[in-house]
């Protein structure tokens, strides 16, 4: 169990904070708005009404003991930057910050922030991807060109042999097949696919795109 702090308890910050609690971590939530703090106080380890642009306040809250701090102050870029400067002064290494604009992002980069988050953009990309590839239920980008993708098979793939589907992109590696509760890592090439089967595949964008056409139309 680790200790984290989340500064700014708007919808993004509150979600991060409650998820961390769900993962059994200690979470201190800080917001200058009493209403936000009160609405979440019973779900967090500590919830504090405080101005995070005040270094003294941050130090009194013992925030330096936290493993990582998430700064989720959105609109007030000045407050976000000041808060990051104080956290740096207090010696906190791991700082994740929600950025609102390109300028905000650039300043945070110069301040040496470990992780800069753009939730709206990230969500937009994910939604566009799921509209474009509806069979992709989840994916993880290893870099710009390399992905691990979870695909759920539809009616169109029912009855196909596994290698009949995958031969369209032999470069793509299948990491796992799941049917109901049964998980197989070493897949029989002649296995007959069924609707609802899950495949977890890994590969570069081009062969994955090529393969995706067959997930739609085969
Ligand atoms: P979200 O989309 O996550 O709801 P947002 O990006 O619109 O939020 P804001 O609502 O501007 O961002 O800020 C998030 C939270 O940060 C708010 O609850 C706000 O009260 C809090 N906040 C703003 N300034 C400070 C500050 N100086 N100290 C502590 N909390 C602050």
Image (spheres, rainbow, N blue to C red):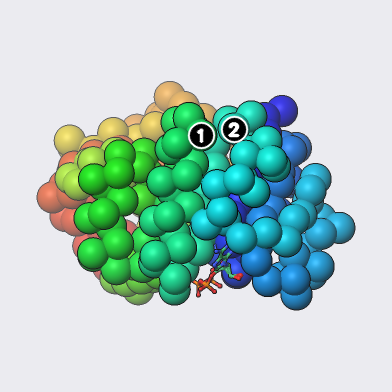
Q: Residue furthest front?
A: 56
The answer to whether one can see residue 216 in this image is: no
Q: Is mark 2 within 8 Å of ligand 1?
A: no
For marks 1 and 2, the one nearer the N-term is: 2
Q: Is residue 190 left or right of residue 30?
A: left
Q: Position of residue 214 (x, y in %)?
A: 25, 59
The residue at which mark 1 appears reads as 90
Is there a contact, CB below 8 Å, between mark 1 and mark 2? yes
Label 2: state its secondary structure: helix
Question: Could you say which quadrant of the image residue 48 lies in?
Answer: bottom right
Q: Position of residue 47 (x, y in %)?
A: 76, 54
Q: Is residue 30 left or right of residue 157?
A: right
Image quadrant in which the N terminus is located? top right
Q: How many marks?
A: 2
Quarter holding ligand 1:
bottom right
Q: Position of residue 66 (x, y in %)?
A: 62, 33
Q: Residues within 10 Å of mark 2 (few under 14, many from 20)?
A: many
Q: Position of residue 108 (x, y in %)?
A: 31, 51
Q: Is mark 1 within 8 Å of ligand 1?
A: no
Look at 75% across and 65% down and name the residue there: 37
The residue at which mark 2 appears reads as 64
């Amino acid at each position: 169990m680790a200790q984290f702090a989340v500064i700014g308890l708007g919808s993004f910050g509150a979600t991060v904070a409650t998820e961390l609690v769900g993962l059994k971590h200690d979470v201190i939530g800080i917001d200058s708005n009493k209403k936000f703090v009160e609405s979440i106080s019973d779900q967090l380890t500590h919830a504090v009404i405080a101005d995070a642009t005040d270094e003294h306040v941050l130090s009194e809250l013992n925030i330096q003991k936290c493993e990582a701090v998430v700064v989720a102050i959105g609109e007030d870029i000045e407050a976000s930057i000041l808060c990051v400067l104080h956290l740096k002064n207090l010696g906190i290494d791991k700082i994740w910050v929600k950025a609102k604009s390109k300028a905000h992002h650039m300043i945070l980069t110069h301040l040496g922030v470990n992780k800069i988050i753009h939730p709206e953009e990230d969500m937009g990309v994910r939604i566009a991807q799921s509209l474009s590839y509806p069979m992709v239920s989840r994916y993880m980008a290893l870099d710009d060109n390399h992905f691990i993708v979870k695909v759920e098979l539809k009616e169109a793939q029912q009855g196909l042999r596994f290698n009949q589907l995958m031969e369209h992109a032999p470069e793509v590696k299948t990491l796992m097949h799941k049917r109901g509760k049964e998980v197989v890592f070493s897949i029989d090439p002649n296995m007959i696919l069924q609707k609802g089967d899950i495949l977890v595949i890994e590969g570069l964008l081009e062969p994955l795109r090529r393969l995706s056409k067959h997930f739609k139309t085969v």
